[in-house]
Image (tube, rainbow, N blue to C red):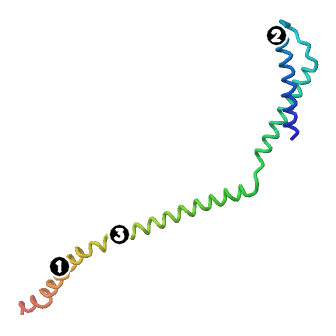
């Protein structure tokens, strides 16, 4: 936590310099004798740079389980997409089966009259017409 301590120290020194500047303004003084101001500025810049490096390093540190969780989520999303597609297809097939089952009466009527027509045609072509031609 060296970077945090450096920033805290630089902040405390900044308050000292701000207080000296405020007193100089109040007295009407244009020139301030600020011993160590250059050193404070360079130290503050160094502390800020160190804090930025520390922040970027801490930001890059991730535990092992974050990658594992991301991989699991990716596999889960792909599996979920496949399951949704299969279940959707099965539901559509089920709806079609129910539609066919609900219209079996209509299908029965059509098949009954179709079978009767086919039977009449067969009877005509195989039994009645040959008998008439003889």
**In the displayed structure, would residue 10 be above or below residue 114?**
above
Circle nearer the N terminus (2, 3)? 2
Q: Which residue is identified by label 3?
A: 96
Asked whether, in this view, residue 115 is left or right of residue 85, the answer is left
Residue 9 in picture, x, y percent from top left: 88, 31
Image quadrant where residue 19 sits = top right
- Distance, label 1 to label 3, CA atoms, is 24 Å
**Element at badge 3?**
helix
Q: Which residue is identified by label 1?
A: 113
Q: Which residue is identified by label 2?
A: 25
**Element at badge 2?**
helix
Please identify the quadrant where the N terminus is shown. top right
User: What residue is at 35 percent from the left and 72 percent from the top?
Assistant: 97
Image quadrant where residue 4 sits = top right
User: What residue is at 84 percent from the left and 15 percent from the top?
Assistant: 21
Circle nearer the N terminus (1, 3)? 3
């Amino acid at each position: 936590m060296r970077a945090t301590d450096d920033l805290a120290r630089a902040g405390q020194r900044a308050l000292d310099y701000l207080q000296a500047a405020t007193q100089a303004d109040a007295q009407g003084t244009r020139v301030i004798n600020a011993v160590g101001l250059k050193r404070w500025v360079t130290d503050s810049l160094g502390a800020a740079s160190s804090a930025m490096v520390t922040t970027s390093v801490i930001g890059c540190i991730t535990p092992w389980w974050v990658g594992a969780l991301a991989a699991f989520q990716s596999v889960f999303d792909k599996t979920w997409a496949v399951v949704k597609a299969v279940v959707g297809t099965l539901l559509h097939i089920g709806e079609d089966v129910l539609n066919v089952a609900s219209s079996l009466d209509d299908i029965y009527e059509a098949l009954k009259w179709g079978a009767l027509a086919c039977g009449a045609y067969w009877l005509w072509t195989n039994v009645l017409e040959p008998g008439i031609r003889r």
